[in-house]
Image (spheres, helix red, strand yellow):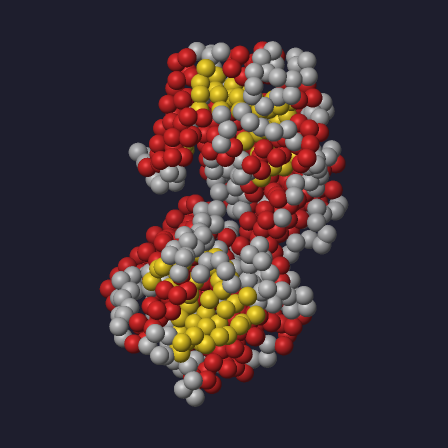
Amino acid sequence: MTDYSTIDFSGLEELSADEVVTHSYVRDIPLPSGKTLALITLDNGRDHTRPNTLGPVTLTEYGATLDALTARAAAGEIDAVAVTGKPYILAAGADLSKVGEIPSKEVAKKMAQLGHFVFGKMKKVGVPSFAFVNGLALGGGVEVALAADYRTIDSSTPALALPEVFLGIIPGWGGAYLLPNLIGIENALKIVIENPLKNNRMLKGQEAFDLGIADAIFGPANYLEDSLVWADGVLTGRIKVKRPNEPGKIERMVKWDVAIGIARKMLESRIGTVAKSPYAALDLLKAAKSGTPEEGFEREDEALAELIAGDQFRASIYAFDLVQKRAKRPAGAPDKALAKPVTKVGIIGAGLMASQFALLFVRRLQVPVVITDLDQARVDKGLDYIRGEIATLLSKGRISPDESNRLNALIHGTTDKAEFNDADWVIEAVFEELGVKQDVFAEIEKHVSDTAVLATNTSSLSVEQIGAKLAHPERLVGFHFFNPVAVMPLVEVVNAPATDEATLSTAMVTAAKLKKNAVITRDTPGFVVNRILAKVLGEAMHAVDTGTSFEVMNRALDPFGLPMTPFELLELVGLKVGAHVLDTHHAAFPDRFFESANLHKLAEHGKIFDRDAKGKITGFDKEAVKIVAPPKGEAKPMTEAEILRRVEDGLADEVHRMLQDDVVHAAEDIDLCLILGAGYPFQMGGLTPYLDRVGASERVFGDTFHHPVIRGVE
């Protein structure tokens, strides 16, 4: 076993130059029984907007603090040690910006070893140790707590998680070994792998307690005082700690490997095998069923070093920065002060998409929302859907009875467009046909005020052309949501040639209030996401139209690591919608986007895949295979490698053209759109870092999207 005390950690100093140090402050607290508990409070001296983070200097100071307390425990001066955080925050783990600067695999391994060395001192302090999880605990913050003998948690804790897999790494400071041995393999799989891959889902305080991560839970009013009394009860033997989820012999002998096997199949079906971190985490969790903690920690050291040094972690950090920073400061956004107030929302349409809009606007803006359609029956159907969704939120405890009543009171439906006269924001969700949208806006403009903003949810039509019949086209903006509206975080805000600054500003401010990330795009076919989508779908249809089998085409793009294949995506968005998107792009760019009569035939047929009763794909539909088959003697099938290179080069060319035409301001905006709107994986960094790494950028336009190319380290 590695003796961490013999390792020279001085090589980590280069990561510490401007570290925001989280200090370890100690005070002795007399307990009711007369015993003394030494309480360490982690605090970086910043307000709650800057969480405690754990860099090399922080860890070294924390280790020295534990050394001093070990000496005091040996001298009989203290009876227990506990660690907590500054108000509302324990720790948010390692400073990712610093981890992203690690220059070599050797330094990465030392960073892993330093964490294990320091946290391991908690078990060797010589007296019982406690962690009081008083708020936010992420990654290394959770592992600080796992290193203690006992844990309490504040019931108001907003987020506890091990998000490392989401970021292309693994819990590398004890989490991959300690957690499954504390709460069982199935619970650990959920926290370490499943939750990070569900858009980085986090646990609330009560959920963490129910799983057994904490031994006791207390309300925020007297959290620290209650935790100290509880700790005293443990020390005196008055309180016996029971851990029902702690794995026993039967779980280790029978359930453990079965759970790992099920998780592996789930991963392969959901994300493929390109992403490395989920599988590395799975291997660590599998090995954690036996052996010593020290052996588990060594495995974590190796796995973390390997991943930190790799391309996927660098790409993940790039993607993380996009979502955390660029998405919050959108490029090209006008002054927020220009935005018009939105005190009432009008929605044209009462179908599923319009009803989703209504629910989102009324929940987030808390203003009156009125929907309209061609007849009262359609309006009533939309209202029933919205009220049904509000009832579901209430039944799940997501909203209170008072909020449910308030939301229902704010929703209204009508066939009388005159009721839109005091709406500040009007958005359409009608059929994706230019003439229909033009007529809808020309009519509604007669009823709305001169200052009302008009928004179109078009996915690929020209916003300028949609506004051609408007007297005031400057008030029209594209506001393209992604389905499902409640879940997908992206809105493409389309800045048409006539759109004025006040309208654009209102759209950006409204998107933020809806808790959506907005990216401004030029008014061009497909904007960003659908243009990329059309390129991929066009290449997929071209391949099968010219004789490549569905099976070969379906596997060819696996190296992209996308959540689904092109044909699965086609069925998800709807074959008719896919055909419309492809037609739109072929009409705009006939030299680069394929036309596919077969896609229209598939749309009429209605499916590509055969599925079982549960919706699981069992193969390709025989009739779909016949539809795309070229005449005898005309088939020119391609290999997977040929298809992959065609798509890579085609995308590199298209993205390069989009940037030259200023569709968005930078490659980062394209990646942000694809991550938030199309499910492109963090581990790939979106699209452009991948195209740089595989050489497509150099092949197509003799340069790269990023300087330097986002690569791992040796």
Q: At which x and y percent is residue 495? A: 68, 29
Residue 661 as seen in the image, left or right of residue 139: right
Above or below, comparing residue 182 to residue 655 in the picture: below
Q: Is residue 216 visible?
A: yes
649 or 308: which is nearer to us? 308
Identified at 37% across, 72% down, the residue is 149
* Depth order, front residue of 102/71: 71
Q: How many marks?
A: 0
Q: Which residue of the protein is positioned furthest toward the left in this rendering?
A: 250
Q: Is residue 261 left or right of residue 58?
A: left
In the displayed structure image, the side of residue 14 where residue 415 appears, left or right? left
Image coords of residue 623 (percent x, y): 41, 25
For residue 615, what is the image quadrant? top left
Q: Is residue 288 visible?
A: no
Rendered position, 55 above or below 440: below
Residue drawn at x 60%, y 61% is: 46
Q: Quadrant of the N terminus?
A: bottom left
Residue 19 coordinates in the image, percent (x, y): 64, 66
Q: Which corner quadrant of the image does residue 699 belong to?
A: top right
Residue at the image position 47 percent from the left and 27 percent from the top:
358
Question: Observer-nearest residue: 103 or 215?
Answer: 215
Is residue 137 left or right of 707 when viewed as pictured? left
The relative height of residue 201 versus residue 673 in the rendered view (above or below) is below
Question: Is the residue 565 above or below the residue 247 in the image?
Answer: above
Residue 333, position as x, y percentages in the image:
68, 37
Q: Which quadrant does the C terminus fall into?
A: bottom right
Q: Residue at x 42, y 30 (%)?
A: 407
Q: Residue furthest bottom?
A: 75
